[in-house]
Image: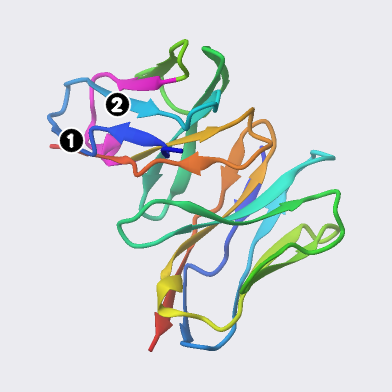
């Protein structure tokens, strides 16, 4: 069974631009969560989607948004990029909601210049 | 809000020795799960071990075991017979309405 895939793997953007990251979960997994990972901050929860509905949202500004499609694939969007948005963005999928093990993708490394 | 605390930012251990990584958490949930994840350098995060809070028996996975102290809200990871491939960042996590992660412990196994 294929693992969680994320595209693109690396991205360089300029302040003020917007970016869309994509995540394909493991086949059969219906829950997708997004995290921002920065040195010293660990993993910060962005949001979780289940069956195309956002279940939970972390403490991030409205510039961060996401969605999930009927095939469970998910995208996250960051508008009006800031230098502080530079991070590794991780996607994780699980069969159901957050009670179960999460399986992580390789991440998208976003650099904002 | 729930919190997960890993008080050891960096640790090192000699190959073949045993090391213990500490984790404490704070939750008001009555039923929850605890996890240790491993993130090798430039590689994908993988699950090391999982513990259901309602189970008193400590989970074990080969060389990895946990010491789960529910009353103290402590969840430490013991790695026995450390190998070079154990060099990684280790994250402790707990569940509530979402996953809560600690800030990680960077473990280096020294040959």
The structure residue drawn at horizontal position 39% and vertical position 27%, both measured from the top left corner, is: A24
On what subunit does the disc labeled 2 rest? A
Callout 1: SS: strand
Tell me which segment is drawn in magenta: A73-88
The structure residue drawn at horizontal position 87% and vertical position 59%, both measured from the top left corner, is: B56
Q: Which residue is mark 2?
A: A21
**Residue A77 highlighted magenta (yes or no):** yes
On what subunit does the disc labeled 1 rest? A
Could you say which quadrant of the image residue B23 lies in?
bottom right
Q: Which sits in the foreground, A77 or A84?
A: A77
**Residue A29 highlighted magenta (yes or no):** no
Which colouring convention does the figure follow? rainbow
Q: Are marks 1 and 2 on the same chain?
A: yes
Where B36 sits versus B67, above or below?
above
Q: Which residue is mark 1?
A: A11
Q: Which mark is residue A3?
A: none
Residue A24 seen by the camera: yes
Where A79 sits versus A24, above or below?
above
- Measured as percent of width and height from the top left, residue B80 is found at 60, 80
- Measured as percent of width and height from the top left, residue B4 is found at 62, 51
Could you say which quadrant of the image residue B21 lies in?
bottom right
The structure residue drawn at horizontal position 84% and vertical position 62%, both measured from the top left corner, is: B57
Where A68 sits versus B98, above or below?
above
């Amino acid at each position: 069974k294929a693992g969680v895939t994320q595209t693109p793997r690396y991205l360089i953007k300029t302040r003020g631009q917007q970016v869309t990251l994509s995540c394909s979960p493991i086949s059969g997994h219906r829950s997708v969560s997004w995290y921002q990972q920065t040195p010293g901050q660990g993993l910060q929860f962005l949001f979780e989607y289940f069956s195309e509905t956002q279940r939970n949202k972390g403490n991030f500004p409205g510039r961060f948004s996401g969605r999930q499609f009927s095939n469970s694939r998910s995208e996250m969007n960051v508008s009006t990029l800031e230098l502080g948005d530079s991070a590794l963005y991780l996607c994780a999928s699980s069969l159901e909601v957050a009670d179960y093990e999460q399986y992580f993708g390789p991440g998208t490394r976003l650099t904002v210049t | 809000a729930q919190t997960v605390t890993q008080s050891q930012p960096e640790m090192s251990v000699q190959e073949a020795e045993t090391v213990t990584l500490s984790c404490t958490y704070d939750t008001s949930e009555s039923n929850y799960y605890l996890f240790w994840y491993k993130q090798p350098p430039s590689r994908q995060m993988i699950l090391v071990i999982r513990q259901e809070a309602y189970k008193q028996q400590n989970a074990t996975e080969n060389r990895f075991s946990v010491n789960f102290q529910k009353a103290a809200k402590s969840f430490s990871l013991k790695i026995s017979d450390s190998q070079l491939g154990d060099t990684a960042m280790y994250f402790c996590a707990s569940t509530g309405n979402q996953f809560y992660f600690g800030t990680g412990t960077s473990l280096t196994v020294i040959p």
